[in-house]
Amino acid sequence: MTAKTRVIVVDDSALVRGLLSEIINREPDMQCIGAAADPLVAREMIRNLNPDVITLDVEMPRMDGIDFLSRLMRLRPTPVVMVSTLTERGADVTLRALELGAVDFVAKPKIGVADGLRQLGEDITDKIRTAARAQVRRLAAPAPAEPGAAPRAAAVVASVGRLSTEKIVFIGASTGGTEATRELLVNLPADAPAVMITQHMPPGFTRSYAARLDGLCRIRVKEAGDGERVLPGHAYIAPGGLHLSVERSGANYIARVRDGEPVNRHKPSVEVLFDSAARVVGPNALGVMLTGMGADGARAMKAMRDAGAWNVCQDEASCVVFGMPREAIAHGAAHEVLPLARIAPALIERLRSTAGLATSRV
């Protein structure tokens, strides 16, 4: 008989602690082994009970969730699912938590918390299952700054050079993907081709995510808007809760942002974006499948390859969860399987080697 996933719930709300415990204990493969009202109580509970997964509220008394998470990931790395509020501050803090090593997050409704959490029960337990299988890495302690030391210069990223504006990079990601996408984008030069991204995220978080990336990257990063022209040197992120695709309008590519039914249980769905890449961009597309649970986008990535696109998947060792890349590889979609750190250089090299060889799709 398979051992149950042992979960500790950390939340300052007694109502939320009770609801999450109830949701977890209903599942035959998991058990809530403890619930703590603040991180100091949780710290002792974790030492004594050694959980497989922790759910952690973002904002709590005595020690906030970010300080607690930072210490936990340095001293005792454990899979964590953050429980966030649907506010701008909640989104910003959640993104910081993912940067520190949290596996995923659940957006707690601002009103009707009890009914809202019960409706999210399947999503919560799915994310706990994923977290239990995730590769969690120890967070390095920050290096002490030397007095009077100059700030370290950012690494120089080589220019792509002369490049057809027909080229577009398409990225799909899920669990672990916010940080994987960040690492890829910060290593692209300002003259990179347009990038279109579907990251599984709920409404209310993608705008903050895009703004954070825009402050870190040489290319401009924004939440995609329906009907806007897709330009080189820009990255467009699918808004949470909406599908993103690409269309042709005369000589230009444009972004399409649409509501609709979930595809592969996701909205936005990588399948929708990659399907449009295969139909509209064909051999001028470059596909990237990053870390994530499930199979969203695998079939459409194979369609991209069949249409002449060049595709790369993140390797298992560098993934938080290898599900989506594994499925794409199994479908025969990948030309290369690379560690995350090598994907941006591989894209740049591929773009240079095919500069001027774009195929007209008009």
Image: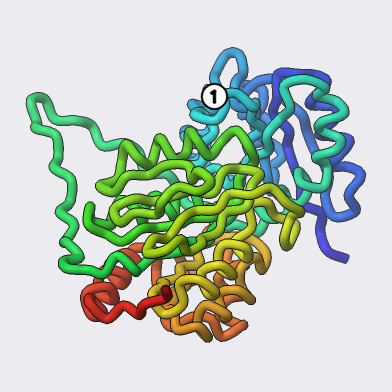
Q: Where's residue 219, x and y in %?
A: 29, 48
Q: Residue at x 20, y 65 (%)?
A: 160
Mark 1 is on which residue type? Glu
Q: Which residue is mark 1?
A: 88
Q: Where's residue 319, x and y in %?
A: 50, 62
Which type of secondary structure does the marked residue at label 1 adopt? helix
Residue 145, quarter of the rendered image: top left
Horizontal relation, residue 114 to residue 359: left or right: right
Choose between 119 and 286: the one closer to the eye: 286
Choose between 103 and 32: the one closer to the eye: 103
Tell me if mark 1 has few (under 14), some (14-19) or many (20+) residues whose alpha carbon lies within 10 angstroms of its own: few
Q: Residue at x 31, y 77 (%)?
A: 358
Can residue 81 be seen here? The reply is no
The residue furthest top is 62
How are the colours assigned in the image?
rainbow
Question: Could you tell me which quadrant the N terminus lies in?
Answer: bottom right
Q: Where's residue 352, x and y in %?
A: 21, 74
Residue 169, quarter of the rendered image: bottom left
Q: Residue at x 50, y 35 (%)?
A: 207
Against 310, residue 134 (above or below) is: above
Against 189, residue 94 (above or below) is: above
